Amino acid sequence: MLGERLAAARKAARLTQNDVADQLGIRRQTYSAYERGVSTPDAHTVGILAKMFGVSADALITEPSVKKHGTEYCTVPVYGRLFPSAPYGTEAELLDYEEVDASLCEGATLSALVIRGGEMEPRMAEGDVVIFRRQAEIPTGSLAVVSVGGGEATVRRLIRYTDGIRLVPLNPAYEPLYYTSEEIRTLPLTFYGKVVELRAKLG
């Protein structure tokens, strides 16, 4: 449960409930209720707590498996933006949570990212959400969440070659970008993971 993970992360960071409450600007009883599972912090507060405890928001939020209406699911964080250059736990703009089929969560760490821009249209539009499995090695042909040179993470189709990779937008109006093996190391390119599900807006 989230409360148990908050308590464990706080203790690992050698902070008291009073310390955390003071930094959040709330009463100790209010924070204590988060750890006891009486109330749930919003996404913004979870992001602040992750930074405070020196962990990722994913580690605090992701529920291994919960049954709801007869269906097992896990809860994953939805990020508006991801930046590899920021310290661990402060790498993201945490917006919300998504419930995902538990089978996708088995043995994996999942996150979600909001699509920005038109590079992946028509399949993915701005405001759609992709669920991705956290992994550094991404097979060729997969849709990958990737960042170039410390910039904001985006979604592209990844094509591997012997001496580099090509990042391909699905929108033909945008040019694919090729990076050599050396550029992958020196820019660098950061691979967050492989897209496993798309949640598109109706409209």
Image (tube, rainbow, N blue to C red):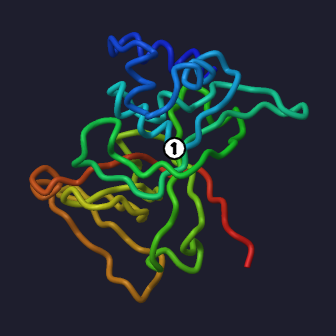
| Direction bottom: furthest residue | 173
Secondary element at image label 1: strand
Instruction: Please name the residue shown 37% across and 84% down the image.
Output: 174
Label 1: few (<14), some (14–19) or many (≥20) C-alpha neighbours in 10 Å: many
Image coordinates of residue 48 in percent, x first then y, are 41, 38
Image quadrant occupied by the N terminus: top right
Q: What residue type is labelled 1?
A: Ser
Image quadrant occupied by the C terminus: bottom right
Instruction: Please name the residue shown 22% across and 48% down the image.
Output: 85
Image coordinates of residue 126 in percent, x first then y, are 54, 74
Please state if 87 lies on the left or on the right of 94 as rendered: left
Q: In this view, does 152 lie above or below 193?
A: below
Instruction: Please name the residue shown 21% across and 56% down the image.
Output: 150
Image coordinates of residue 178 in percent, x first then y, are 23, 69
- The picture quadrant where one finds residue 134 is top left
- The picture quadrant where one finds residue 180 is bottom left
Q: How many labels does the image show?
A: 1
- The picture quadrant where one finds residue 128 is bottom right
Q: Which of 20 and 1 is in front in this view?
A: 20
| Direction right: furthest residue | 69
Q: Name the residue under label 1.
A: 111
Instruction: Please name the residue shown 27% across and 48% down the image.
Output: 84
Q: Which of 58 and 37 is in front in this view?
A: 37
Q: In this view, does 119 lie above or below 43?
A: below
Please state if 149 lies on the left or on the right of 145 as rendered: left
Image coordinates of residue 136 in percent, x first then y, are 34, 41
Q: Is residue 84 above or below residue 89?
A: below
Q: Which of 96 and 159 is in front in this view?
A: 96
Q: Is residue 133 above or below residue 37?
A: below
